[in-house]
């Protein structure tokens, strides 16, 4: 089960989900462009990777496509380690809203890994717009696809 919480005191979104996976598998799912493309976002969208340099100091750009409509996202990988990723994330349709995201991969020592994500944005208004945008649907459907890839041996 995925939990999505808005911090009441700071404009942060926190997401938590446990996966039947190793930290290395989840890191790969977040850094390998072909794997990432297959699971990220809602089921109704397809993803195209335009730029992907998954290393500390690298950057990325991907496009979510539905019919003829495209929504582009971009950011920089500030740090990639076996236990965490620090990156920025922004939607090109709202370029002033830049998230600073940290993803932690915590080994639960029973074949599962907890993924914790913290996304900080500059204002409560911007944070709340993201929450109302359907973000939670994309997170839940994307993680369900990732679960399927872990189950079928893709990862």
Image (cartoon, rainbow, N blue to C red):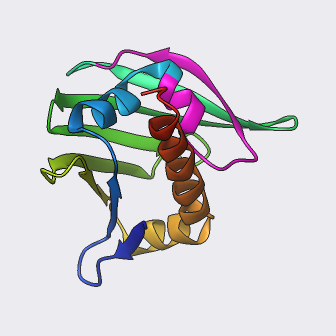
Q: Is residue 145 above or below residue 125?
A: above
**Residue located at (57% from left, 44% from top):** 145
Residue 78 visible in this rendered orientation of the protein:
yes
Q: Which image quadrant: the C terminus? A: top left
Image check: 124 left or right of 12?
right
Is residue 47 a member of the stretch shown in magenta?
Answer: yes
Task: Work out whether 17 lies above or below 77.
Answer: below
Find out whether residue 50 is within the magenta segment: yes
The residue furthest right is 67
Q: Please, is residue 43 above or below residue 64 in the view?
A: below
Q: How many marks?
A: 0
For image coordinates 65% across by 50% down, the residue present is 42
Residue 112 percent across, percent down from the top left: 25, 50
- Quarter-wise, where is residue 91 in the image? top right
Residue 34: percent from left, percent from top: 52, 19
Q: Nearer the viewer, residue 75 or 146?
A: 146
Q: 117 or 147: nearer the eye? A: 147
In screen coordinates, is 54 left or right of 150? Answer: left
Q: x, y percentage for residue 92? A: 57, 39
Which residue: 23% across, 48% down? 102
Going 36% across and 68% down the picture, which residue do you hit? 123
**Image x and y of residue 122, in percent:** 32, 61
Horizontal side, residue 137 vs residue 110: left or right: right
Residue 121 seen from this side:
no
Q: Residue furthest bottom?
A: 8
Front residue of this view, candidates 38 and 100: 38
Magenta segment boundaries in residue numbering:
35-54
Q: From the viewer's perspective, tell me whether residue 107 is left or right of residue 155.
A: left
Location of the N terminus by quadrant is bottom left
């Amino acid at each position: 089960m995925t939990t999505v919480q808005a911090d009441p005191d700071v404009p942060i979104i926190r997401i938590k989900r446990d996966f039947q996976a190793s930290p290395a598998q989840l890191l790969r799912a977040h850094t390998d462009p072909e794997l990432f493309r297959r699971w990220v976002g809602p089921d109704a969208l397809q993803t195209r990777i335009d730029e992907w340099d998954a290393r500390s100091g690298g950057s990325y750009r991907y496009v979510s496509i539905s019919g003829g409509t495209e929504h582009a996202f971009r950011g920089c990988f500030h740090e990639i380690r076996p236990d965490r990723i620090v990156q920025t994330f922004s939607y090109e349709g709202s370029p002033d809203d830049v998230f600073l995201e940290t993803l932690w991969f915590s080994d639960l020592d029973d074949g599962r890994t907890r993924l914790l994500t913290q996304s900080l944005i500059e204002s409560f208004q911007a944070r709340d717009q993201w929450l109302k945008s359907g973000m939670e649907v994309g997170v839940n459907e994307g993680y369900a696809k990732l679960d399927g890839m872990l189950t079928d041996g893709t990862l």
